[in-house]
Amino acid sequence: MTRKLYLEDLKTGDVFKSGEYALDADEIKAFAERYDPQPFHLDEEAARDTFFQGLAASGWHTSAITMRLFVGSVPLAGGIIGAGSDVSWAQPTRPGDVLRVESTILDIKPSRSKPDRGIVTLQSDTLNQRGELCQRAVSKVLAFRRE
């Protein structure tokens, strides 16, 4: 069982590394059919003549995978409770990519009005198997103090 982390366990500069997640064309298409049905996410041939010049995962699919990896690698007591995020996609996620997430604590602000918690700002970089940045999310999450 992974040790749960509380606000007082965290410090600026802490880095958390996730496991890996392999992505294939079938999963990209299935996600797109359901949530982002655009040609560059659904069909290899149609995707060749688009901005992406080939099949690309939806950015929201990359975000969903990032969240799964983030939850598994940042063991905050009380879970990952988001308080806002700024997301950018540096390059498309492609079939065959193996993603991992590296999250770094940028800032910790204990709450002045609610002493049992604080807000932690993290930068989570989603990298492919070549270490290339696919997505960057700078997020604020709630972290609780021990009772």
Image (cartoon, rainbow, N blue to C red):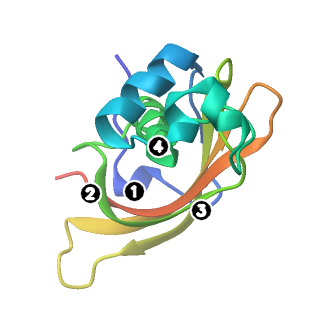
The tag on residue 145 is 2
Look at the picture and state if 76 lies above or below 43.
Answer: below
Residue 39 horizontal/vertical position (percent): 52, 39
Residue under label 4: 38
Q: Earlier in the sequence, mark 3 or mark 4?
A: 3
| Mark 4: secondary structure | loop
Q: Earlier in the sequence, mark 2 or mark 3?
A: 3
Q: Earlier in the sequence, mark 4 or mark 1?
A: 1
Cβ–Cβ under 8 Å for marks 2 and 4 = no
Q: Which of the pair 13/35 is nearer the observer?
A: 35
Q: Amino acid at mark 3?
A: Thr
Q: Amino acid at mark 4?
A: Gln
| Mark 3: secondary structure | loop
Cβ–Cβ under 8 Å for marks 2 and 3 = no
Residue depth check, mark 3 versus mark 4: number of the one nearer the observer: 4
Cβ–Cβ under 8 Å for marks 3 and 1 = no
Q: CA distance from mark 4 to mark 1?
A: 45 Å
| Mark 2: secondary structure | loop
Residue depth check, mark 3 versus mark 1: number of the one nearer the observer: 3
Q: Residues within 10 Å of mark 1 (few under 14, many from 20)?
A: some
- Residue at 64%, 22% (x, y): give it: 95
Q: CA distance from mark 3 to mark 1?
A: 11 Å
The tag on residue 12 is 3
Q: CA distance from mark 3 to mark 4?
A: 40 Å
Residue under label 1: 8
Residue 5 horizontal/vertical position (percent): 37, 42
Q: Which of the pair 19/40 is nearer the observer?
A: 40
Residue depth check, mark 4 versus mark 1: number of the one nearer the observer: 4
